[in-house]
Amino acid sequence: MATAPEVAATPAPSAILPEAIATLVFNGGVATERAIPRSLRPRLRPDGLEQRVRATATRQIPGRVTQPGRASDNLCGVPGLVGERLAPITGRTRGCGIAEPVRLRAVDGITLSTPATVNCETARALQTWVQRSVVPTVGRTGGGVASLRVVASYACRTRNNQPGARISEHGRGNAVDIAGIGLANGDELTVLSDWGGGRDGRMLRDMHRGACGPFGTVLGPNSDRFHRDHFHFDVASYRSGPYCR
């Protein structure tokens, strides 16, 4: 009885030396496996890869203003102020920083569109303005006040971002900028569009006037070109009394 010819065993890919890679070579229509030596040394990193990775990692590290804080519904010891206490903020420029900052999220149930990083004096002044002016002025229009559109709070910069100017009250946590009053029905009273005349314009003027007192400085569209689209409020004090324009 004839026996089948012995066939040389082909090594499995796993048996090939680590520094080789298996490939198929066709010879006369018959596929055979051949090991081709290849270095396992990793390819060179693309230029700039390390710098890009480091930059991404740096962006993901939270700064002092964005770090999680201690949540409170009684922020600054005042019922109705909702937010978190933050670690002290040290400004990169002399004159900036907040010793006891807070991240304010809501005032008496009225949401801030963007959490405001301020000091407690500014947070309390904002609440006084909301209670004494904003809520009574708006009344039931549009279902009542639902939110405040905050466009600026803490920022270490000069006044109006002008070179050579003094440090802004924003750089001390003393200021907050409001661009609009959101209503429950989805409408918004905006400083840019509604300041002129009509019912909405009159309400904005009344609210602007009502901020004079709770805040030491109140600026709006009539003050200068830098404030045509928002109200600037800060708690700086003056011997002559509040400065409101």
Image (cartoon, rainbow, N blue to C red):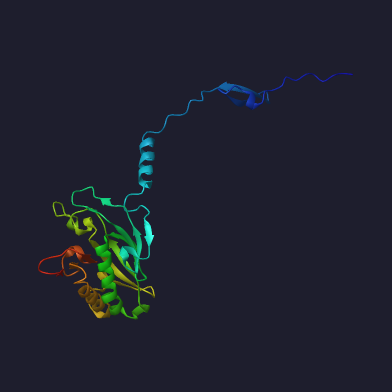
- Asked if 28 appears above or below 158 in the picture, the reply is above
If the image is split into quadrants, where does the N terminus sit?
A: top right
Give the residue furthest to the front.
Answer: 77
Q: Position of residue 133 (x, y in %)?
A: 26, 76
Is 199 in front, or is 26?
199
Give the residue furthest to the right.
Answer: 1
Give the residue furthest to the left.
Answer: 240
| Left or right, residue 40 beside residue 151 | right
Query: How many numbered marks appear?
Result: 0
Q: Position of residue 62 (x, y in %)?
A: 36, 49
- Can residue 229 be spotted in the picture? no
Residue at image position (63%, 27%) is: 14
Q: Position of residue 200 (x, y in %)?
A: 27, 77
| Left or right, residue 1 beside residue 229 | right
Q: Answer with the quarter of the image where residue 159 lies.
A: bottom left
Q: Answer with the quarter of the image where residue 11 lies.
A: top right
- Asked if 43 appears above or below 229 in the picture, the reply is above
- Asked if 41 appears above or below 90 in the picture, the reply is above
Is 119 in front, or is 171?
119
Q: Position of residue 137 (x, y in %)?
A: 28, 79
- Asked if 189 appears above or below 2 in the picture, the reply is below
If the image is split into quadrants, where does the C terminus sit?
A: bottom left
Is 21 in front, or is 25?
21
- Can residue 131 be spotted in the picture? yes
Residue at image position (51%, 25%) is: 40
Q: Answer with the quarter of the image where residue 2 lies.
A: top right
